[in-house]
């Protein structure tokens, strides 16, 4: 309850500061906010678009959150997401029956995400390499690798601005408007993460290892195994975030500037912080973030300067993410002692 | 208004930001030239009160008069300038610096460590050492000094700053009985020179040994201020605890059974290549408490951590005939070892977890179904059982353990460890930081377990605890056993000498 009140307080604060920014810009903040809201939620089409945009954020948010639960600062979702997207797309080159094709694409994409998380775990546990460093490096490796594949190997022979599109039998069926059945994948994954963390022995061990590695080790829990599990699970979720951009959203391809994959991986961090690193909170956080993103895009269409929109969006997100971010900083202090244990 | 008061505190109250009420209107008068005892249980407010007097914490309300003038120190530095200095339980020394450098360091203005200045500091410190009888090597990095000597450096630092009121927070916790005796005579010497000392303790014997007057605190209030001569230990104990405690459990006469734990040439590497534990050999048998006494930091922590599988070691160790080499904490626990760690918060509990989640830490298996799912119903039933069996004061199994008192946290740890039905229990500082009632509870429980045939390895820096509970006592000094004594040979004097590194002939 306290956390809900806290979240509402920072939301109001963020909105007020955002309003101040717009006022300083000489814009009427309240009508701008109104157009943001109506742009994101005002009608069914807009709502479906907002929901659809939120799904990838749910998944990358989960990646970050499960890392935090294990005591990690895993920012590798971006690279894993890019790789997951390109692997899912490449499955379009295979010939498989419809439906099964989709399942196979998801499976391979998830494996690719895990494979991209594996070196992070291996480096951390055998050589003590901080996961922040290794994930940033792997993010860049993935970025250039995927860009190369998209432009050189997978691009559409006629339309150079994107890759080929995946065959219809590999796509998520449409529910309504922009929203596809990828919705179920995102919800089910969030639900699974929640169940796993709070109702499974391995999840208990992840949480114990993250909160107090010394006590966990003393209790016979392998902190290394817990961290590895969290990284691998996170890899799958992040890869699926990329996969559903390709398999569950127009244009069912990857644009040559990777713009339709965007910064999903990094935005997931903000989503996880807004959602207090809780899978169910992340659902709300992702929807909130999706609302801002869709609404901001619509505001841009109405001639409101895009920089201002970004600033307002950023201000609100920073406010919303601040309480959990501060809590993490506090938690990490005792965690520093545990580094020996983790090595 | 007390005349001839050096320090007068009136109506001091302190409420911490989290809502904890530490002090509820406390009065304290310290006269010039007296050693004033501040007696109370853990959590009674002794440390908070002295932190307020020494400028480290602001009071929520109340006023302090220093030499008759109303003062409000906003920092320890200000208090020090006025003549009030405090030696905390955790020393404020720079490890790699020598004693002399540490003393010179705190001085205001630049060039505190310039050679010219340091030389003049040396002359004055040497004079102070002669005058007070408080000797400490000045040219050795303080991190290489034993804790008891580091404490002297801290006190010299304060004397060098010419304090008129010296506050010592539980100074004897890190001293052997002989070192404590020396400290007492130094304090009496300071009082004879007209300086005042506030001496914080929860040990009655120390109050009667060194103080002129004593103020007893209980739950943030002053229960009494007395002249020490004429007060009896029983009377002070009653004031401190507020109730009569039942007499301690009598130990049953029983012959120890088969050997449960055996170590031979057990060595644990320490920092910088020096072994923390060096070639220790001993055994613990069923129905026996082996106590390990010693000043903190002589290898006890490393010994225990290695035994439970948290540190590498060499030599030989076996539990019920099974070699412990190469086994991790989980495996060793499953052989029948339970561990009450010295650091309850760091190692015994996960503070953010609730009581039930902590109750199954290290013992998940009975609460899982074949798919590895946690059976929460069973977990909560078990937690409720622990709450009632070990009299844990808690609103329920869902309360985060952070909100439990130290005593109740420890009952939870002990209950959980005993639920593992261990053959060997390692209890490391099991009553540190607990109030008198909880301490008595834990000690009685350990004795009962011993009577029922459990093998117990007790590690404690509290000599009284070791002597009360143990069947045999090993004294640890710099990583080795300076001697092992059986109950008939218990003698505080002798153990104290062993604790200080004085080896026995033969």
Image: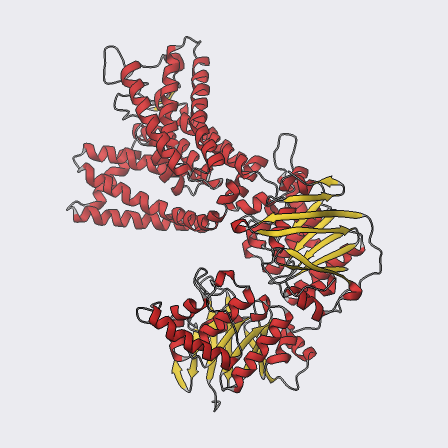
The residue at the point 65 percent across, 47 percent down is B307
Is A168 located above or below residue B264 in the figure? above
Q: Which residue is outermost to the left?
A: A26
Q: Which residue is outermost to the bottom?
A: B3
Q: Residue A200: in sight, yes or no?
A: no
Spot occupied by residue A76 in the image (x, y as percentages of width and height): 39, 33
Is A89 located above or below residue B484 in the figure? above
A101 and A75: which is toward the camera: A75
Spot occupied by residue A78 in the image (x, y as percentages of width and height): 36, 31
Q: Is residue B41 left or right of residue B282?
A: left
The residue at the point 37 percent across, 15 percent down is A90
The residue at the point 70 percent across, 66 percent down is B495
Spot occupied by residue A179 in the image (x, y as percentages of width and height): 36, 25
Please tell me how many numbered marks the rendered image carries. Answer: 0
The residue at the point 28 percent across, 38 percent down is A37
B384 and B62: which is toward the camera: B62
């Amino acid at each position: 309850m306290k956390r809900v009140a806290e979240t509402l307080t920072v939301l109001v604060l963020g909105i007020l500061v955002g309003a101040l920014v717009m006022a300083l810009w000489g814009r009427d903040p309240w009508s701008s906010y109104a157009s943001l809201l109506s742009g994101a939620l005002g009608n069914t089409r807009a709502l479906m678009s907002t929901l659809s945009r939120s799904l990838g954020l749910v998944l990358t948010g989960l990646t970050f959150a499960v890392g935090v639960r294990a005591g990690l600062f895993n920012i590798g979702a971006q690279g894993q997401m890019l790789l997951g997207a390109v692997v899912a797309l490449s499955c379009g080159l295979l010939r498989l029956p419809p439906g099964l094709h989709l399942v196979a694409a998801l499976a391979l994409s998830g494996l690719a995400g895990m494979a991209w998380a594996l070196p992070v775990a291996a480096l951390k546990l055998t050589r003590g390499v901080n996961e922040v460093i290794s994930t940033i490096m792997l993010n860049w490796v993935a970025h250039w690798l995927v860009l190369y594949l998209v432009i050189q190997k997978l691009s559409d022979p006629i339309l150079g601005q994107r890759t080929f599109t995946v065959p219809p039998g590999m796509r998520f069926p449409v529910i309504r408007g922009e929203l596809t059945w990828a919705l179920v994948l995102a919800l089910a994954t969030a639900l699974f993460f929640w169940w796993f963390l709070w109702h499974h022995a391995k999840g208990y061990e992840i949480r114990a290892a993250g909160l107090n590695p010394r006590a966990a080790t003393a209790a016979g829990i392998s902190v290394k195994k817990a961290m590895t599990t969290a990284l691998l699970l996170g890899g799958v979720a992040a890869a699926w975030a990329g996969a559903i951009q390709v398999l569950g959203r127009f244009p069912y391809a990857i644009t040559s500037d990777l713009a339709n994959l965007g910064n999903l991986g990094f935005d997931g961090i903000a989503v996880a912080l807004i959602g207090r690193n809780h899978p169910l909170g992340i659902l709300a956080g992702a929807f909130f973030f999706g609302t801002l993103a869709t609404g901001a895009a619509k505001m841009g269409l109405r001639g409101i300067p895009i920089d201002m929109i970004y600033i307002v969006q950023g201000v609100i997100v920073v406010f919303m993410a601040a309480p959990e971010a501060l809590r993490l900083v506090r938690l990490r202090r005792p965690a520093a002692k545990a580094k020996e244990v983790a090595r | 208004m007390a005349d001839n008061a050096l320090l007068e505190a009136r109506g001091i109250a302190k409420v911490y930001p989290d809502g904890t009420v530490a002090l509820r209107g406390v009065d304290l008068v310290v006269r010039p030239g007296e050693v004033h005892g501040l007696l109370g249980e853990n959590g009674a407010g002794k440390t908070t009160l002295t932190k307020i007097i020494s400028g480290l914490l602001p009071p929520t309300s109340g006023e302090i008069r220093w030499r008759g003038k109303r003062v409000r120190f906003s920092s320890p530095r200000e208090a020090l300038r006025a003549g009030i200095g405090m030696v905390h339980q955790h020393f404020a020394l720079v490890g790699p610096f020598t004693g002399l450098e540490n003393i010179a360091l705190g001085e205001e203005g630049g060039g505190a460590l310039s050679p010219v200045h340091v030389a003049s500091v040396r002359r004055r410190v040497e004079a102070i050492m002669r005058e007070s009888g408080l000797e400490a090597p000045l040219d050795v990095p303080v991190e290489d000094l034993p804790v008891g000597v580091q404490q002297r450096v801290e006190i010299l630092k304060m004397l060098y700053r010419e304090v008129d009121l010296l506050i010592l927070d539980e100074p004897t916790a890190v001293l052997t009985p002989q070192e404590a005796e020396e400290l007492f005579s130094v304090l009496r010497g300071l009082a004879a020179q007209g300086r005042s000392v506030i001496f914080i303790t929860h040990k009655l014997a120390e109050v009667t040994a060194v103080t002129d007057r004593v103020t007893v605190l209980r739950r943030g209030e002053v229960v009494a201020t007395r002249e020490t001569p004429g007060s009896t230990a029983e009377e002070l104990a009653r004031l401190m605890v507020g109730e009569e405690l039942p007499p301690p459990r009598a130990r049953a006469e029983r012959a120890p059974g088969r050997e449960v734990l055996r170590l031979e040439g057990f060595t644990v590497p320490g920092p910088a290549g020096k072994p923390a534990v060096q070639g220790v050999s001993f055994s613990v048998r069923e129905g026996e408490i082996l106590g390990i006494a010693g000043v903190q930091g002589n290898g006890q922590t490393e010994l225990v951590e290695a035994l439970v599988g948290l540190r590498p070691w060499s030599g030989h160790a076996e539990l019920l005939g099974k070699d412990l080499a190469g086994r991790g904490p989980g495996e060793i626990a499953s052989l029948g070892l339970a561990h009450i760690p010295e650091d309850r918060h760091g190692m015994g509990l996960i503070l953010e977890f609730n009581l039930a989640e902590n109750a199954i830490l290290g013992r998940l298996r009975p609460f899982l179904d074949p798919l590895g799912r946690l059976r929460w119903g069973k977990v909560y039933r078990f937690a409720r059982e622990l709450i009632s069996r070990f009299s844990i004061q808690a609103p329920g199994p869902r309360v985060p353990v952070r909100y439990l008192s130290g005593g109740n946290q420890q009952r939870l740890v002990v209950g959980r460890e005993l639920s593992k039905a261990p053959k060997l229990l390692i209890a490391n500082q099991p009553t540190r930081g607990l109030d008198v009632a909880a301490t008595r509870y834990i000690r009685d429980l350990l004795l009962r377990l011993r009577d029922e045939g459990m093998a117990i390895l007790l590690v404690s820096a509290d000599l009284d605890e070791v002597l009360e509970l143990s069947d045999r006592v090993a004294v640890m000094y710099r990583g080795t056993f300076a001697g092992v004594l059986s109950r008939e040979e218990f003698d505080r004097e002798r153990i104290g000498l062993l604790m200080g590194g004085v080896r026995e002939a033969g």
